[in-house]
Image (cartoon, helix red, strand yellow):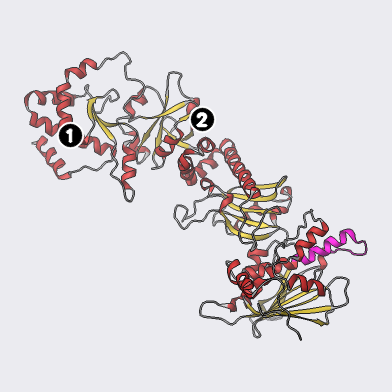
Amino acid sequence: METKQFKAESKRLLDMMINSIYTHREIFLRELLSNASDAIDKIYYKALTDDSLTFDKDSYYIKVTADKDNRVLKITDTGIGMTLEELENNLGTIAKSGSLAFKKENEIKDGYDIIGQFGVGFYSAFMVADEVTVISKALGSEAAYKWESQGADGYTITPVEKDSVGTEITLKIKENTEDENYDEYLEEYRLKSIIKKYSDFIRYPIKMDVTERKLKEGSESEYEDVVEEQTINSMVPIWRKNKKDLTKEDYEHFYAEKRYGFDKPLKHVHISVDGAVRYNAILYIPENIPFDYYTQEYEKGLELYSNGVLIMNKCADLLPDYFSFVKGMVDSEDLSLNISREMLQHDRQLKLIAKNINKKIKSELLSILNNEREKYEEFFKAFGRQLKFGVYSDYGTHKDELQDLLMFYSSKEKKLVTLDEYVSRMPEDQKYIYYATGESNERIDKLPQTELVADKGYEILYFTEEIDEFAIRMVMSYKEKEFKSVSSGDLGFTADESQDTAAEEQENKGLFDFMKNTLSEKVKDVRISKRLKTHPVCLTTDGAVSIEMEKILNAMPNSQNVKADKVLEINVHHDVFASLKDAFEKDQEKLTLYTNLLYNQALLIEGLPIEDPVEFTNNICKVMV
């Protein structure tokens, strides 16, 4: 028997096919099952134009059989089969695809699109097999042929007997090595797992003989192993079913079956698009945040299918980072796949799908916000931080897209509110959207800096997450209203617009200069406060860096010791100010003591560390004595 050489390629090319193109060895089964599905599809297409053929879908199937003792795995299909010439051309020439040629000849365009394009998937079998045998009988032919190969050395083709039309592929599975466990491709549970993972939605039944532990007939306690033929795949994917025929429970079952999460989805979105790019998608917004969501280990992405065959488990390009919490899948016939079908060629179709999905997610979130407020607040508590990171990232590129989804706690409403709701309630004389930063709502409630803004009747947004102020700095303004911190040097108004503090400042200039010199480089200035009413002192800032930003930036690894330009503000209407004036006139050593105490008091209010706690406690003792 003459061994024929592969026509087009060398041993090096086949080695590349086997060892380089595919990332995971288990892919071989996906490829062979996809080829089997293509073979049945070809009969379907033939039947469309050949009146002598009828296509009864229930008569067609694929079967996977494992023989552990002989290390043999078989994949049998009832498809169109291959002639001698097709065996020569399709299996004897690496990277020549019979499916691609069939598609071009028959101008296939309807929903039964054939998967195979490149003609290399078959050779993935050599990743797990020492020897591959193909026995095939073509539709309309009396003859059958056997193709055999042990790899790059070549192949043989001989006539054989075969009763039925179709193809049987037999793999002689490799022996285990130190690095690879090939036994797993003969294990029933492993084969079922691979079929469910990659080929669950192939439209024809994939059958296996499955061993089940059952009670012996007539016995109440004795069990026996019973071998039954079972269909492993679901065949009809949920996303191809009519939405009207599906219930909430159906979508929740699919969510659990695909292990998108251990919770129940907060919301699902079912998309069917038949336009320039055809695709179906089911997207889920989870109820609970995954335990590893804000870690480096978390992988974003949607499952990606091509005609029901899983191509990528996590396609990150389909989701922007700020919507990385979304789970689900996309199935499209129109994607340009690379040669291994494991990755996508980054093309216009993929970008268009991603753009449409992004719009759909935002639209759905806005719908929940407007129509199911409690559910949205539940979602925002879990994933709002990610939306804020989205506003901040890429230099604020996505701020316009995300700002309507943001929520912050309101000083007036005592609950989460949107920016739109805040602006809609603003009095006519209010120039800015005011916010205050702190570790919690309770701490912000007690901040001295909020007094004047609150007394003016203005609403304050509470920023309690480290990302909040950074994100808002990127937004800058909302509906032409700028954001302003209650700790900023200029609030845009004073307690009494007619009040003139210039005379008071001039009168006490010596006192404030002394206090500023005492604090040296700790503060940029000491000045009369226009915002304090009942509290004696507070810290505010001049410049772009706030006190809260200073705390966050300096808590980061490799911090550059960033400092805000702090200003110590003194309430001249508080009893403490009289003591300061008296000390300035009579005992400047006491004034130094008072100045340091007030500064440290202001630090504590802001949640900043005191530089020398021992000195601080000693100073308190001095005052008490």
Query: Badge 2: how crowded within 10 Å, few (<14), some, or many (20+)?
Result: some
Secondary structure under the numbered disc 1 in the rendered image: helix
Of 482 and 147, nearer the camera is 147
Of 560 and 94, nearer the camera is 94
In magenta, the rendered stretch is 37-56
Amino acid under label 2? Asp
- Whether residue 119 appears in this view of the structure is yes
Amino acid under label 1? Leu
Disc number at residue 420? 2
Left or right of 533, for residue 414: right
User: In front of the other: label 1 or label 2?
Assistant: 1
Is 89 above or below relative to 223? above
Separation (CA) of disc 1 from disc 2: 42 Å
Of 21 and 566, nearer the camera is 21
Is 572 above or below relative to 210? above
Disc number at residue 297? none
Look at the image and say whether residue 38 sits in the magenta stretch. Answer: yes
Q: Position of residue 123 (x, y in %)?
A: 67, 72
Of 145 and 176, nearer the camera is 145
Image quarter where the N terminus lies is bottom right
Q: Residue at x 93, y 61 (%)?
A: 51
Is 120 above or below relative to 417? below
Q: Residue at x 83, y 64 (%)?
A: 43
Q: Position of residue 33 (x, y in %)?
A: 71, 68
Q: Residue at x 7, y 28 (%)?
A: 587
- The mark that comes first in sequence, 1 or 2, is 2
Q: Position of residue 358 (x, y in %)?
A: 59, 44
Image quarter where the C terminus lies is top left
Disc number at residue 519? 1
